[in-house]
Amino acid sequence: MMAASNAVRRLARGVQVGVALVLLLLAFGWSLVPAAAPIAPAAVLIAYAVIAHLSGFIMDGKRGSQWVTLTCGGLSAAVLIRSLVVQYFGRTADNAVMVTIVFGLWLLAGIATTGRTGRIRDAVLSSTLSAQIGSLANVGFILASYYVLRGSALQERFFHTEGTYDDFARSGISDFGAFVMGDLFGGAFFHLLFGALFGALLGTIGGALTVGVIRVLRRPGGLPDTRLHPTASSTHEHYGAQQ
């Protein structure tokens, strides 16, 4: 039990490390453009760290639920980052497919965790942490790639594919660098906020459905038998017909 608890806490600390790295990326961007203060995304990141800390003490990891969380979160991060990478090569990802896969992974984390522990609470925490892992990786990649590729042909192509120049022309802002940084900080806020919220919602849905199925299966006799059974009268009539 102690080993399981330690494993969950290590997962929580990993999420907190991710929070710290994204905070550093936000701070670096703020140093480049002091007029764009990343207060909103920083506040969400602090909430991430608190949730991860609490999860380390609340979540039941005795049946390997932390590995389910990490796997689903890591896969969702890979899907989200891939959708960004292709834009550097002038292509766009199918957002509907991407969102469906990511949400499916977060839902799967809740279902699989509840199947192991039987608790909706663990499903909510597992899906939320999976969403946090995916969202942190997504935002971290967006910020880091901009800082590294700023001014390059790849970054120019990304802006054209994303429609950043069109958005800048409509914004009325004269400083393109300030516009981009403000846009990045705004995107980071919404990605982080809604990522965690949808993760918690999907975990609640997945956990409730799984608990309901488990309760039905554990009833005496299991699932109700819906097959048609012959009645005594029909059996007698069939026997009489054979006579």
Image (spheres, helix red, strand yellow):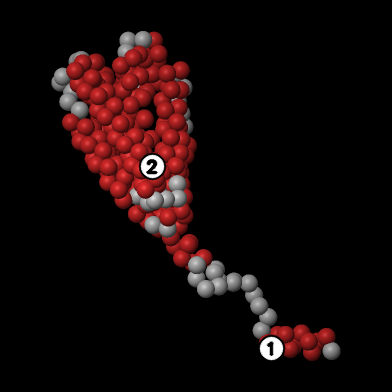
Instruction: Choose the circle earlier in sequence order: 2 or 1.
Output: 2
| Amino acid type assigned to the residue bearing label 1 in the image | Ser
Q: Position of residue 57 (x, y in %)?
A: 30, 48
Q: Are marks 2 and 1 in contact (CB under 8 Å)?
A: no
Answer with left or right where residue 20 lies relative to residue 39: right
Which structural element holds mark 2? helix
- Indicate the quadrant where residue 100 lies: top left
Q: Nearer the viewer, residue 162 or 12?
A: 12
Kindly tell me whether residue 26 is visible in this rendering.
yes
Q: Position of residue 188 (x, y in %)?
A: 28, 30
Q: Position of residue 101 (x, y in %)?
A: 47, 39
What's the residue at 46%, 35% (across, down)? 75
Answer with left or right where residue 169 lies relative to residue 86: left
Which structural element holds mark 1? helix
Q: In this view, which residue lies farthest toward the top?
A: 152
| Amino acid type assigned to the residue bearing label 2 in the image | Ala
Q: Residues within 10 Å of mark 1 (few under 14, many from 20)?
A: few
Q: Nearer the viewer, residue 93 or 9?
A: 9
Q: Residues within 10 Å of mark 2 (few under 14, many from 20)?
A: some
What's the residue at 15%, 21% (across, down)? 35
What's the residue at 26%, 38% (across, down)? 49
What's the residue at 36%, 30% (across, down)? 137
**Mark 2, residue position:** 7
**Mark 1, residue position:** 233
